[in-house]
Image: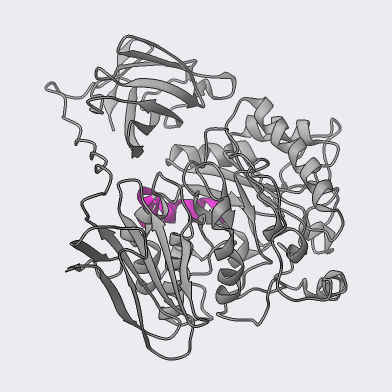
Amino acid sequence: MRCFARGRRSAAALAAGLLMAAGAAIVLPVSPAQALNNGVARTPPMGWNSWNTFGCNINETLIRQMADAIVNSGMRDLGYKYVVVDDCWMNSTRDAQGNLQANPSRFPSGMKALGDYLHARGLLFGIYQAPLDRTCAQYFGSYPGATGAQGHEVQDARQFAAWGVDYLKYDWCSPSGTINDQVARFAIMRDALAATGRPIVYSINSNSIHAKTGPQRNWGDVANIWRTTEDITNAWNTGQTNGYPMGIQNIINVNVPLAGYAAPGSFNDPDMMEVGRGGMNDTEMRSHFAMWAIMASPLIAGNDIRNMDAATQTILKNQNLIAINQDTLGRQATQVSFDGTRRILAKPLANGDVAVALFNQGGSTTTISTTAAAIGKSGSSFTLRDAWTNATSTTTGAISASVPAHGTVVYRVSGSSTSPTATPTPPTPTPPTSPPASGNCQVTYAVSGQWSGGFQGDVTIRNTGTSAINGWTLRWSFANGQQLNQAWNTSYTQSGTQVTATNVAYNGAISPGASVSFGFIASWTGSNTTPTAFTLNGSPCALG
């Protein structure tokens, strides 16, 4: 259960009574679900969540400090952008109109102010709510009130959009309800979020007795990401097949068979990470991160970012593994072989490479071997890049490593005569020939993902002036052959090469020092050259 942690083990007896004579969960046959097409989570979300380290002990000062630490540590620039405020942020009662309120002692500035603080730092705002009458902490009596969304879904969705929320964690946290009951109720919030016009990552935790829900359905028609197991804890193996609490090894056993559910816009969620929270050795922590990366899992850190040691930073900031996780093909690694100890997983990547994980579940060092052919590559000459050491080697097909107990070696395998044409790397933006504009705005433009024939762009507009901007229109020119196809957090038109992006209702005002962000999907033929000039409301902007 999402909130068994920190003194909620009293519910374990209830859970045990509901787990039908146990054994391995069987994935039920269901019709394939389509990825939730709301423009977000085209790759697994990355960020940080307050629960694993702080539980209910949160406040706005803590969240702001964590946001600053994410920026200052360089994690934001590696993709960790969602800052998710978990349970216990809300007042115990709604206001006279039925609106959610921030806890006045914990978040005296309010949730919109917190969202503005995050957005101004290039981060995204996540928040927690529950679909029944109570949140998880309220359900287990560790937080007062009954302010769940039941009967308030549309109202809450509009409130979240008004606050600038970019990510909703929606937690069932009750043994009640069949799968069909949950699908129906989760769909209410899905539709309410869509109706706001604000693209919001929709993350659900279905019925907390996950042996009867989580792994037995593809939830991609309901949510962007969905929990597949019981709550994680900072241990390697708790002996659970899918009961509270789950160790890293236990979660991997449940999550690996669900690879077919993953696609851009919808991913299996094996829970927030425990890297940097103790309870495991460095080898196990590395395996935890490597396996989350190759399983296309959300990379949501759960440690205290303010005081990470060097080992934790090395793991969480591994750019090779982040690139594998964030690959635009959006595929989860599938199992190539498993003998009970040596597990081999392979994840195809958008440029034709394949990431392969050699995972040792045993208690002593062993050699794990496979071949390029077994992981879907053909040819006679391949390059292996070790994700941990960054060392490269060549092979005619053999892939092998000596792997320590509970360790994971990850190679990125490239080469072969039949690989797809490599995706072109976007060129480094050419600086303007004239000095940057000294006006009242700064624009940061980034290509955050690309594939054959298309790319995703992210744009941030920062108000560098001293007066508020109330309503904005941003213009730039694409290179010939680039065509904007869809966007979020903005409305847009394109005439020839000129693109015009205009604010939507909830993000028209930009106060001094603040920023707004939007994203888009575009196709391209011949060139994906980065624009080098932008105007906001007719005036030129500096480039960020």
Work out whether residue 285 or residue 523 is closer to the camera in this orientation and state it. Answer: 523
Q: Is residue 428 left or right of residue 301?
A: left
Query: Could you say which quadrant of the image residue 537 lies in?
Result: top left
- Coloring applied to the structure: one colour
Q: Is residue 218 left or right of residue 133?
A: left
Quadrant of the image for the N terminus? bottom right
Residue at 83% from the left image edge and 56% from the top image edge: 144
Magenta residues, dominant SS class: helix
Position in image of residue 440 (x %, y %): 34, 21
Please, which residue is most extreme toward the bottom here?
Answer: 364
Work out whether residue 456 or residue 454 is closer to the camera in this orientation and state it. Answer: 454
Vertical position of residue 391 compared to residue 147: above or below = below
Work out whether residue 102 or residue 287 is closer to the camera in this orientation and state it. Answer: 287
Is 71 magenta? The answer is yes
Query: How many numbered dots are placed on residues in this image?
Result: 0
Q: Is residue 61 something that shows in the picture?
A: no
Which contiguous range is marked in magenta? 61-78
Residue at 59% from the left image edge and 45% from the top image edge: 126
Q: Is residue 350 something that shows in the picture?
A: yes
Quadrant of the image for the C terminus? top left
Position in image of residue 202 (x %, y %): 63, 42
Position in image of residue 178 (x %, y %): 84, 53
Vertical position of residue 518 compared to residue 297: above or below = above
Query: Could you say which quadrant of the image residue 519 lies in?
Result: top left
Vertical position of residue 173 compared to residue 120: above or below = below
Residue at 51% from the left image edge and 42% from the top image edge: 41
Q: Is residue 528 left or right of residue 60?
A: left
